[in-house]
Image (cartoon, rainbow, N blue to C red):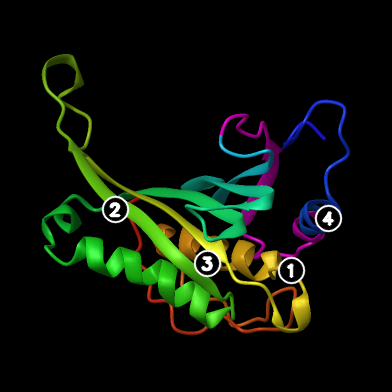
Amino acid sequence: MAAVHGHSGDEAPFPFRQAVEAVRSARVRPEIRIEETAAPRRLASYAYALEAAVLVDGEELADGRLVLLHEPDGHDAWHGDFRVVTLARAELEPEMAGDPLLPEVSWSWLTGALAARGAAYDHPSGTVSRASSHYFGALADKTDDTQIEIRASWTPRDRPGGAGPDVVAHLVAWCDLLCACAGLPPSDGPDAAGRGAGGVVPLPKRRS
């Protein structure tokens, strides 16, 4: 339970425990390796955190972090009692950094993945950053590299009938975002709830 943070000595509320168990039982693409990590202590009363990497033939193509936050009495800034906070990053071909549409396209990977997985949400926010490194002197033989980093958060919408948010759909959509950053094609198979991916166009495969 090291990945779950909550009030010391208090049992986490049922909606949060239910959401965490759903995430832990979710099935994701075989290229994704997920492990629990320490949850932040200051963002919410209760938090659960994951780290993930996209691995193909032993090479890590993208990585990221997902944090599920919960405030039992709701949070004014979230307009709800749950919030999903994510990070996704990957190395790109250097020439991709000059594409003026890269930030907009990258953000569309996230919104497209959420839509394709049926992960309803409100009040999204985020940033898309890109950075290039050029090497000199003793490092001059290293190839220039460019990284993209997508940071985002949103409020998952409750399901009809008073049920809590479908956190598995949000997790799988985030995994789709990681795979898009890694240059992998969309998955043809369904997610843990039987939904196909569809619609997410990845970056060109990065240089190995």
Q: Do the residues under discs 4 and 2 have CB atoms within 8 angstroms?
A: no
Left or right side of 18 for 166 = left
- Furthest residue in direction top, as rendered: 138
What is the three-letter code of the residue carrying label 1? Gly
For mark 3, what is the residue?
Answer: 176
Q: Residues within 10 Å of mark 2 (few under 14, many from 20)?
A: some
Q: Quadrant of the N terminus?
A: top right
Residue 31: x %, y % from top left: 61, 59
Residue 128's tag is 2
* Residue 136, percent from left and from top: 11, 22
Hey, which quadrant is residue 201 in on the image?
A: bottom left
Q: Which residue matches tag 1?
A: 164
Give the mark, 1 or 2, whose residue is nearer the N terminus: 2
Q: Nearer the viewer, residue 115 or 140?
A: 115
Measure the alpha-carbon separation of dots 4 and 1: 13 Å
SS state under label 1: loop
Q: Nearer the viewer, residue 72 or 144?
A: 72
